[in-house]
Image (cartoon, rainbow, N blue to C red):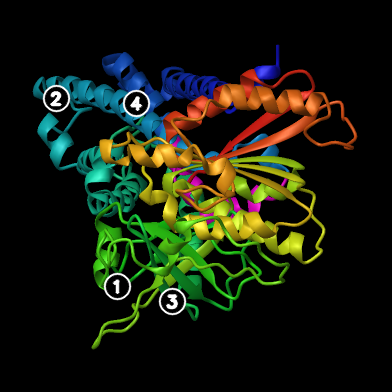
Amino acid sequence: MFKGLETWTTRRYVFFITWFILHVILFIFGVLRVKNDDNLINLNKPLNYSLWIARGGGICLIWDCSIILLPVCRNILRILRVSFLNKLIPIDENIWFHKITAYSIVVCTVIHSVGHYINIFKMNKLHMAGDPGFPMSGGELLYKSPAGVTGHIMLLCMVLMYTTAKQSQRNKSFEAFWYTHHLAFIMLGSLMFHGIGCIVKDQDGVCRGYRSYQYLLIGYILYIIERCIRAYRARLETRLVKAIQHPAGVIELQIQKPSFKYKPGQYMFINIPDLSEYQWHPFTITSSPFEDYVSVHIRQAGDWTRALATRMGVEKEGRGGDSGRGRQAAGGPPKKAEKSTELIDDRGEEIHVRAGFSMPEVRIDGPFGAPTEDVFDHEIVVLVGSGIGVTPFASILRDIWYRANNNMSLKTKRIEFYWVCRDLASLKWFQSLLATIEGSMLNVQLKIHIYCTAVMKPDQHHNIALHMNDDFSGGDTITGLRALTNFGRPNFGAIFSELRQGITNGTYMPGATQELMVDVAVFFCGPGAMAKSLRKESRLQSKNGVKFSFRKEHF
């Protein structure tokens, strides 16, 4: 009965129900607070339902607007994530919670605004009839009173913010989303002063406002502290030491910042003033804490990333066609690696700065926690990356390699790594790292599964024929890895079923002690549609003493 409560989908349903009930309670409280107030008989009698509805919606708005900024206070969430609260509250779902709160604000705004427009219509009629209790006309209330002016400012800000926050619009122009979203400061500032006109007065002329600023200030102050911490930390000494061009339009930045301490699987925000003084973009860290730099891999997919490539002097398709050291790894089977205490891999072509240019200034902020941070808490791990979504696992695999090959304690014993790519070119930038790790991983069993979902062109069919004989050549013709490339999409239902059967009959981890419940951690980074499928299969295949725990990257 309660099995479904352990899935993210059901937890979201529980949240929706709790969220809805909370708003119903707040709405009823706001309505009754006004309706049952004998001192407001001067308003209750002529305005009645429209006044009550407006006040109920207003109470809900105060609650939503007081917490809307908390999910984007990343430093606070970073602290909460390592606390016991992470087991009760889905801290990693902070952006989703931010969106839900924003949708709730829209609904409550409509209720509040419609109620007050009706109020103003009634108040204007009473004013025209000469009622001394309503000295202002409808036009004055709408466009001259503090409540009317600040209310319309907030509505304008919301229209601009919400229309540019749609995912389709963000993909077209991230800059439009970025700058209009900062209208939130004007909107929330207007909300602070929304009640200073004191339109709602009792029969003795006493102002009966919400005093909403008392509640809003808490969230605002926390967010101001958050921004101050970011500003200070971002301006600590930072230096871009190397940039590497990889196939498929991927650029790797290697950055040194002595004050920056991180864990594998975490992410950070990057700002490059040459491109934009104010834009900060999140990227997963791909290096290991054992290395003397922090790196990110950036795919050219938007205005900012393409501007970065232009600033670095590279083209999306890559210079020299398929040339470059990182591309040479695809020519045949990998060489047998010797045991080493340093992970060295040939990962691309270093970008040399053109004459008259210098490396751009880089600012970084972070690190911030992510679900993949918990990889080392599990013995059996399934890592699934789609396209550039493989970047979190680059850091994980590198860190595991360092730990395993330097005789460091490591709870993780088995890793099933799945990488799903649309085209063959996307396989190239990460393959040399995989080849190095695949050939020299000690103490940890790593199995690599590569899937290419591209529709093969007629002139590429001969590669499949070569591929069929790879079992005898010792390596994959396409990637150079020992693991063969599969064409098509992985069937995770069948994959998880086979994995579960291997665990239950003892063939997957021979010699391991069978526990009452074996936890297989499934970590995913990629598109939402694939995440939905993986989450579903994780739930369906969790039986017979094996539980597949699904976790998805969010930032």
Give the image location of residue 286, x and y in percent.
53, 60
Q: Quadrant of residue 137?
A: top left
Q: Is residue 300 left or right of residue 386?
A: left
Instruction: Indicate which disc, 3 or 1, sits on the residue closer to the N terminus.
Output: 3
Foreground: disc 3 or disc 2: 3
Q: Residue at x 79, y 54 (%)?
A: 443
Q: Is residue 145 above or below residue 18?
A: below
Q: Residue at x 18, y 19 (%)?
A: 122
Foreground: disc 3 or disc 4: 3
Foreground: disc 4 or disc 1: 1
The residue identified by callout 3 is 242
Instruction: Indicate which disc, 2 or 4, sits on the residue closer to the N terminus.
Output: 4
Q: Residue at x 38, y 26 (%)?
A: 57
Q: Is residue 546 above or below residue 228?
A: above
Secondary structure, mark 1, is helix
The residue identified by callout 1 is 312
Q: Is residue 421 left or right of residue 335?
A: left
Instruction: Indicate which disc, 3 or 2, sits on the residue closer to the N terminus.
Output: 2
Instruction: Look at the image and say whether residue 188 sits in the magenta stretch.
Output: no
Q: Quadrant of the N terminus?
A: top right
Q: Amino acid at mark 3?
A: Lys
Q: Cα distance, mark 3 to mark 4?
A: 49 Å
Q: Which residues are magenta?
A: 64-83
Sort mark 2 into few (<14), some (14-19) or many (20+) by Cα contacts within 10 Å.
many
The residue identified by callout 2 is 124
Q: Cα distance, mark 3 to mark 1?
A: 11 Å
Q: Cα distance, mark 3 to mark 2?
A: 68 Å
Magenta stretch: helix, strand or loop mostly: helix
Instruction: Indicate which disc, 3 or 4, sits on the residue closer to the N terminus.
Output: 4
Sort mark 1 into few (<14), some (14-19) or many (20+) by Cα contacts within 10 Å.
many
